[in-house]
Image (cartoon, coloured by chain):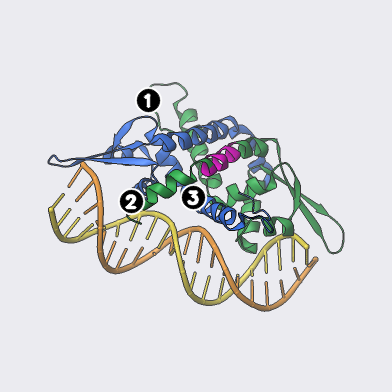
Chain colours: A green, B blue, C yellow, D orange
Amino acid sequence: MVTKEYAGSPDEADLRRADSLAREIFSDVANKWALLIIEALGDRTVRFSALRDEVEGISHKMLTQNLRMLERNGLVERTVHATVPPRVEYTLTGPGRGLRETVDLMCDWTHRHIAHIEAARRGFGG
Amino acid sequence: MVTKEYAGSPDEADLRRADSLAREIFSDVANKWALLIIEALGDRTVRFSALRDEVEGISHKMLTQNLRMLERNGLVERTVHATVPPRVEYTLTGPGRGLRETVDLMCDWTHRHIAHIEAARRGFGG
DNA sequence: CTGGATCCTAAATGATACTG
DNA sequence: CAGTATCATTTAGGATCCAG
């Protein structure tokens, strides 16, 4: 994610483009709602309403908005069952599951460092 | 990061508290600026101005704001050299470096899936 | 049930000016 | 140079209503 010096490279333009694309993808995905949704999906297939219940505090709007974004980036697959009332299910794609593994690690990290962070906060002046 | 059922547990209150704290910490760090700063720091000690140059597009305000937040959570250490003009350096703490490892993985993931994501975007209707 | 559209508020962010 | 404060603006987010 570091911007490098490409001057002189024959593929300078391509490399710059890849970097800016990587940064754009990172910005899409690196927000709490997207990561919490990915974490909630796990390796399951989950209905919209179930997802809304499981991602604590998320609104209808944020859920649909982030699901669309994840779908657009090929990380989530959306399946509509033509029943009435409609049943829509979401599941992670292969790349989506790869990303989920990194989110899992981030969640693990969080839980392992709760005590340290609490202590730091007390010492900081809070 | 999943909310569990603690009813009946003797430590119910403690567990709920740990969960809500984990969620709060996660919400703090799971934003693009914080993660990009952590990634830019790497295992180095970096001056404020250098950090601002390296995290492309970040404003003075966002940088200070996120650095304070990371410092408050004990992930970044701030060192002020009493020179003139002042020199302020930032470096990741032990826990901060642990988090950086997961961010590294997320960046790797991003670069590995650029092609897949580009293809998904084209197919989605963009 | 799911999803889109709308309106409205709160929060994030950028620009700027000022200080030690 | 680093940091704070302020102000203006943009964006995120919530509430609600309607449609398939």
> Looking at the rendering, which quadrant does residue B17 occupy?
bottom right
Q: Is residue A9 above or below residue B37?
A: above
**Is residue A109 located in the magenta-colored stretch of the structure?**
yes
Q: Which residue is labeled 1 in the image?
A: A7
User: In the image, is residue B63 part of the stretch drawn in magenta?
Assistant: no
- Residue type marked 1: Ala
Residues at circles 3 and 1 in contact by the CB criterion of under 8 Å: no
Q: Say which amino acid is labelled 2.
A: Phe
State the SS at label 3: helix
Instruction: Point out residue B69 in the picture as x, y percentages from the top left corner.
Output: 38, 50
Measure the C-alpha gap from mark 3 to mark 2: 15 Å
Question: Which percent across, then down, holds residue A100?
Answer: 63, 39
- Mark nearest the camera among 3 and 2 is 2
Residues in magenta?
A: A102-111
Report whether residue B118 is seen: no
Residue at 39% in and 46% down: B70
Q: Nearer the viewer, mark 2 or mark 1?
A: 2
Q: In which quadrant of the rendered view does residue B52 lie?
A: top left
Q: How many marks?
A: 3
- Give A85 or B126, whichever is nearer the viewer: A85
The answer to whether A6 is drawn above or below residue A50 in the figure is above
**Residue to which mark 3 is pinned:** B25
Element carrying mark 1: loop
> Dot 2: what SS?
helix
Is B116 or A126 nearer to us in this picture? A126
Report which residue position mark 2 lands on: A124
Q: Residues under labels 3 and 1: Cα distance?
A: 40 Å
Q: Which label's residue is closer to the chain start, 2 or 1?
A: 1
Q: Is residue B79 among what the camera can see?
A: yes
Chain containing the residue with disc 3: B
Q: Main secondary structure of the magenta part?
A: helix
